[in-house]
Amino acid sequence: MFAAAAPTLPLIREGKLRALGVTSIERLEEAPEIPPIADTIPGFNALNWTIVLAPAETPKEIVLTLHGELKAIMAMRDVQAQIGRIGMFPVDSPEPGALASVISAEVTRWGRIVQQAGIAGTQ
Amino acid sequence: MRSDDAYHPGSGSSSPLMISTPTVSPRTICLWRVAVAIVLVLLPLQLPVQAQNYPTRPIRLISPFPAGGANDVLASVLAGKLAERLGGAVVVENRPGAGAVIGLMVLARSAPDGYTLALSGSTLAVAGTLYKQPPFDAMKDFAPVALVTHYPFVLVVNPSLPAHSVPELIRLARSSPGNCSTHRPAPRPRSTSIPSCSRAWPGSSSVTFPIAAPRRPWSTSWLDALH
């Protein structure tokens, strides 16, 4: 099973699950003993990411206000410690204007993987 | 024709308009022009004023996944800090379903006023290809605010499985074709970005199916479904 670290790490520690690998190239800070799958399959790197979105046409000033606050929040040590405990890494976000190209690149990348997996248009 | 004439066709002395309105003094016209100019100058200031007062009511942060999962935990952390810094309430609203598509559809249909936000995952990038009728356009329906985290998945097995490492799991999968099944913790396939094991190591075969997320956060009762 490929599972997010947050609900999985406690079960691994209790011995109810056995961890074989993480899908990132980096090891988890909270569980450095779990090796990257890339150690066995070179180049294996599958990261989920989280992004805060607003509806299209939201006033730019509000988007910039929220962007600044979120960027400051993700730089806080206590926040980084909290998200580290659930197996996440903080991201120093690009400006809102640059995020469209980030999303576009991810749409292209994962779109290709969905096509290759033969599951395009199956939902 | 001079360029001035082209832009002011009614300004010539023979214009019937000028002849029919002799009572409007140049001073009145000048005042009107000043008034219109003031309005035009002030109009663009409306938005910054709105942003300066933001927020004036609670902000809704949609977590498109069940309570207790990683997305929900992160949403709670962000909501708490945003509320402190903005001086207003930020409420997390769990809207799970269809691999986060339900929550993102709610966002796409919300008023673009800064009072509804969502914490999306990579679903945003796969929905357009995965669905026959894509529920939203990742590039057009949303205003991206900030990337906040990235995180890997952990490949886990039932401890009774005779595999203690990825190479051992690959050997096991190859030695018993058809018996390797991978599961995803969502009501419908969500983590389509994760290749199933048959793709990861050719020569094995696999079955991939989703299992329902636990009803109670951090519950272990669903472990029985894993193997």
Image (spheres, coloured by chain):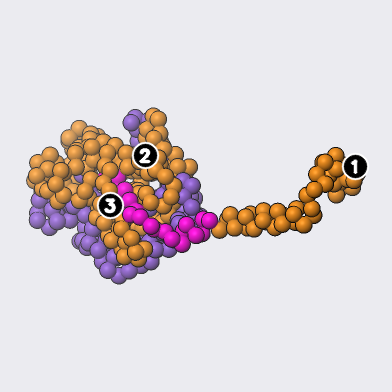
Q: Which mark is residue A15?
A: none
Q: Amino acid at mark 3?
A: Val
Residue B125 on image: x %, y %? 40, 43
Residue in front for this viewpoint, B133 or A30: B133
**Visual hue assigned to chain B:** orange
Residue assigned mark 2:
B105
Bounds of the magenta span?
Answer: B46-65
Q: Amino acid at mark 1?
A: Ser
* Chain colored purple: A
Which picture quadrant has residue A27?
Answer: bottom left
Residue assigned mark 3:
B92
Q: Is residue A57 visible?
A: yes
Mark 3, mark 1: which one is toward the viewer?
1
The residue positioned 19% from the left and 39% from the top of the image is B212
Crowd rating for badge 2 (residues with CA inside 10 Å; few <14, some 14–19, many 20+): some
Residue B95 on image: x %, y %? 28, 43
Q: Is residue A79 above or below residue B13?
A: below
> What distance separates the C-alpha of mark 2 from that of mark 1?
61 Å
Residue assigned mark 1:
B14
